[in-house]
Structure formats: structure tokens, C-alpha cells
């Protein structure tokens, strides 16, 4: 490797680290049931908050509430993954580097 290639690799590594730090601080918001369940996910792996509209709480149908919460969380995680992948792609030019995020 010549000196220029090493410098480019170091610059890319620094940009990747910066992007990883930014992604870790990203809050993704999702919802289910037309907005009766809202979830905020921090960094793609931590539930920041869950908001439940009291009108959706039915003691006789807890399963529906569980399903809505699960759907909102799964949607948020998927949104996070897509967003993170797009941000990383902007740096790597589409290279799939294992362990990036």
C-alpha cells in the first residue's frame, strides 16, 4: 500500500467511527394501530419510551395490545436498520464491511 491509500483508509475509518457514533445516538420513532401505540428506539437496540393511548387498553383483549406493541417495536427496529445501512453506504460506497454496526 502506498501512503495515499493508507491515508484514505484512515480517513474512511474515522468517518465510519463518526457515523457509528451518530447512529448510536439516533432515536427512531414508530407506531402501530393507527398511532395508538408509539415507540421510540435509541440506537436501534434500546427502547427509549412506549406510549399507549388509554382508549386501546381492553382488559379482555390483552393479546391485541401485546401484538400492537410488538408490531411498533419491530417496525422501529426495521426503520433503524434501513436508516443505518443507508448512512453507512454513503461512506463505504456500498461495500459490505462486517461488524460496521
Image: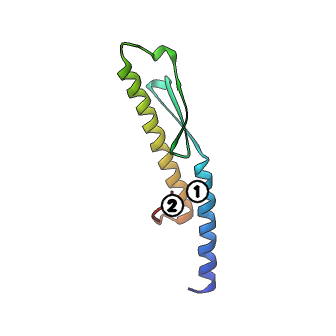
Percent across and percent down for residue 59 are 40, 13
Q: Is residue 70 above or below residue 97?
A: above
Q: Is residue 1 left or right of residue 68?
A: right
Residue neighbourhood size for the residue with mark 2, other residues' Cα within 10 Å, grouped as few (<14), some (14–19), many (≥20): few
What residue sits right under mark 2 in the picture?
100
Q: Residue at x 41, y 33 (%)?
A: 71
Q: Quadrant of residue 66?
A: top left
Q: Nearer the viewer, residue 22 or 86?
A: 22
Q: Nearer the viewer, residue 82 or 44?
A: 44
Residue neighbourhood size for the residue with mark 1, other residues' Cα within 10 Å, grouped as few (<14), some (14–19), many (≥20): some
Percent across and percent down for residue 86 are 52, 54
Pointer 2 with pointer 1, Cβ within 8 A? yes
Q: Is residue 97 above or below residue 85?
A: below
Q: The N terminus is located in which quarter?
A: bottom right
Q: Residue at x 47, y 66 (%)?
A: 95
Q: Residue at x 44, y 29 (%)?
A: 69
The tag on residue 76 is none
The tag on residue 20 is 1
Amino acid at each position: 500500500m502506498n501512503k495515499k491509500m493508507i491515508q484514505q483508509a484512515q480517513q474512511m475509518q474515522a468517518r465510519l467511527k463518526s457515523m457509528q457514533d451518530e447512529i448510536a445516538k439516533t432515536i427512531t420513532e414508530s407506531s402501530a394501530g393507527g398511532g395508538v401505540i408509539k415507540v421510540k428506539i435509541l440506537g436501534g437496540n434500546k427502547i427509549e419510551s412506549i406510549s399507549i393511548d388509554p382508549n386501546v387498553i381492553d382488559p379482555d383483549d390483552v393479546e391485541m395490545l401485546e401484538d400492537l406493541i410488538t408490531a411498533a417495536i419491530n417496525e422501529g427496529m426495521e426503520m433503524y436498520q434501513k436508516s443505518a445501512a443507508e448512512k453507512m453506504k454513503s461512506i463505504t460506497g456500498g461495500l459490505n464491511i462486517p461488524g460496521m454496526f
